[in-house]
Image: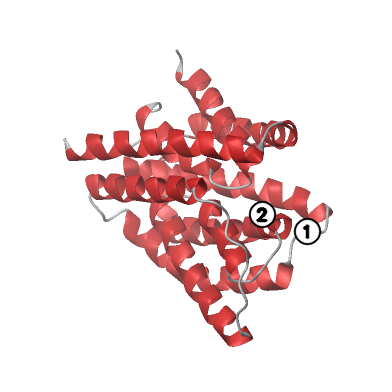
Amino acid sequence: MSVLILALVAGAVVGLALGALGGGGSILAVPALIYLLGFTPAAATTASLIIVTATSLTALYAHARTGNVRWKAGALFAAAGLLPAAAAGAAASRLPQPVLTVAFAAVAALAAVTMLRPGQPGTAHTPVVRLAKAAGTGAGLGALTGLLGVGGGFLAVPALVTVLAFEMQAAVSTSLLVISANSMASLAARGATTAGIDWTVIGPFTGAAILGAWDGKRLAAKASGTGLQRTFAVVLLAVAAFMLIDALT
């Protein structure tokens, strides 16, 4: 199978998962880039950021038109993650490849476990406690985005629900603003590492992911959200286990 076809198929799967689940689908981009398209872990995380940024901005535009994005709260949440995202993005190229692979596998496993757990309702906090927790969560999310090239929707959505007491629809929509901001900050910090990206692969991958996200939204309307999430979580656990074994052997 040619590289172009693999890029299109992988991009479509990533976009489909992202559109159907509202977050977490982009975490499949890195292993797809490494094991299907031959990228190094460092190059894969940079390329993933490009894919995540383009897909998230497109989805953010669609959600903004429906009025579900909470711009002020989302901007404050994102602001806490900008510096960590930039710092982690600059540091990523200096880390050994096995370390990046193991770290990514651990985050993928965490994402899967988070998706398998039942949703937790928002809890009552004072404004000060909410602000402190939101800042800490936003900073951690930014660091993960910068270091590993993941959008972090699987963490941003539950954080917005539990820490800021957002309803789910607003959390999904606002998380796209946070993801977009963190991804762009990390890309800016990586700078020169984007020069070696193979755009003949990333271009089709990104285009297929954007189109797949629209199909994912339609799939979500027809299928059980819980069933889709659990299926994706099981696949993600398998991917995490494979990556961990590969890095340690």
Question: Does residue 235 sit above or below 86 in this rendering?
Answer: above
Name the residue located 62 percent from the left edge and 63 percent from the top edge.
Answer: 121
Q: Position of residue 239 (x, y in %)?
A: 38, 35
Q: Is residue 87 left or right of residue 9?
A: left
Q: Is residue 216 left or right of residue 206?
A: right
Residue pointed to by mark 1: 68
Choose the circle earlier in sequence order: 2 or 1. Answer: 1
Q: Residues within 10 Å of mark 2 (few under 14, many from 20)?
A: many
Name the residue located 30 percent from the left edge and 44 percent from the top edge.
Answer: 101
Name the residue located 56 percent from the left edge and 64 percent from the top edge.
Answer: 159
Q: Position of residue 23 (x, y in %)?
A: 58, 48
User: Can residue 38 be seen in the rendering of this structure?
Assistant: no
Name the residue located 58 percent from the left edge and 87 percent from the top edge.
Answer: 128
User: Can residue 150 be seen in the rendering of this structure?
Assistant: yes
Residue in front for this viewpoint, 174 or 147: 174
Cα–Cα span, label 2 and label 1:
9 Å
Q: Is residue 178 left or right of residue 219?
A: left
Q: Quadrant of the N terminus?
A: top left
Tell me the quarter of the picture where residue 181 sits.
bottom right
Which mark is on residue 165?
none
